[in-house]
């Protein structure tokens, strides 16, 4: 039984040795990993952080520019609305100034055109000579009825 105890003791010693070698390798790799993480952190601090700060400044500038453009767009919109209103007022005033005095003139022109059309139809029907010619001459067109 003594031999069996020595064998088991040897197996335990060998396992402890393998475990120690494994832990030493793990510690070396952990230290290497820590060194790489530290290098990445330093690189991040020196290269990426300033870029992120610049990006934040650019983003803030874009936000401010957007606000300014929005304000300017509202001003332009108000200006255009005011201009359109003033143009409509000017057009209305001009129409009142020009067309009011011409109103009676338009009525007189329409009356004269009516008289002219009546004379034209009277001449087509024969005028005063139609009574001398005989029976009444019928006008074939309805156009004279439309004024």
Image: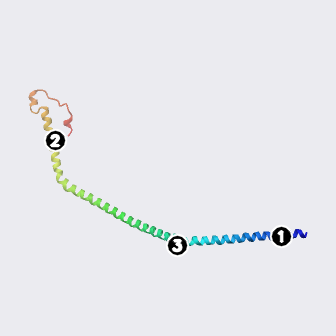
Q: Residue at x 9, y 31 (%)?
A: 129
The answer to whether residue 79 is above or below residue 146 is below
Label 2 or label 1, whichever lies nearer to me, is 1
Describe residue 37's horizontal placement relative to residue 26 as left or right: left
Residue of label 2? 114
State the separation of the CA atoms marked 3 and 2: 96 Å
Classed neighbour count for the residue bearing mark 3: other residues with Cα under 10 Å, few (<14), some (14–19), many (≥20)? few
Towards the viewer: 26 or 85: 26
Instruction: Return the x and y of residue 9 as percentages of the image width and height.
Output: 84, 71
Nearest-to-viewer mark from 3 and 1: 1
| Residue that numbered label 1 is attached to | 10
- Distance from disc 3 to disc 1, alpha carbons, whole Å, reads 54 Å
Q: Dividing the picture into quarters, in which one does residue 29 lie?
A: bottom right
Q: Which residue is mark 3?
A: 46
Q: Nearer the viewer, residue 83 or 116?
A: 83
Q: Secondary structure at mark 1?
A: helix
Residue 2 is left or right of residue 96, and the answer is right
Classify mark 1: residues with Cα within 10 Å, few (<14), some (14-19) or many (20+).
Answer: few
Q: Nearer the viewer, mark 3 or mark 2?
A: 3
Q: Is residue 105 left or right of residue 18?
A: left
Q: Residues within 10 Å of mark 2 (few under 14, many from 20)?
A: some
Residue 71, percent from left and from top: 37, 66
The image quarter in which residue 73 lies: bottom left
Asked if 95 appears above or below 46 in the picture, the reply is above
Q: Earlier in the sequence, mark 3 or mark 1?
A: 1
Above or below, 147 relative to 32 = above
Residue 104 got which mark? none
Assess whether mark 1 and mark 2 are in contact (beta carbons under 8 angstroms). no
- What secondary structure is found at the residue carrying circle 2? helix
Q: Are marks 3 and 2 in contact (CB under 8 Å)?
A: no
């Amino acid at each position: 039984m003594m031999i069996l105890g020595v064998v088991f003791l040897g197996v335990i010693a060998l396992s402890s040795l393998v475990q120690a070698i494994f832990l030493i390798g793990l510690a070396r790799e952990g230290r290497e990993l820590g060194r790489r993480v530290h290098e990445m952190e330093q690189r991040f601090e020196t290269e990426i952080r300033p870029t992120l700060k610049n990006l934040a400044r650019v983003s803030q500038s874009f936000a401010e520019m957007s606000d300014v453009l929005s304000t300017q767009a509202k001003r332009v919109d108000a200006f255009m609305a005011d201009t359109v209103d003033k143009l409509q007022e000017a057009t209305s005033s001009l129409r009142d100034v020009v067309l009011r005095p011409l109103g009676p003139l338009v009525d007189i022109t329409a009356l004269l055109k009516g008289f002219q059309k009546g004379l034209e139809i009277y001449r087509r029907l024969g005028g005063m000579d139609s009574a001398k010619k005989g029976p009444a001459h019928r006008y074939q067109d309805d156009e004279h009825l439309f004024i």
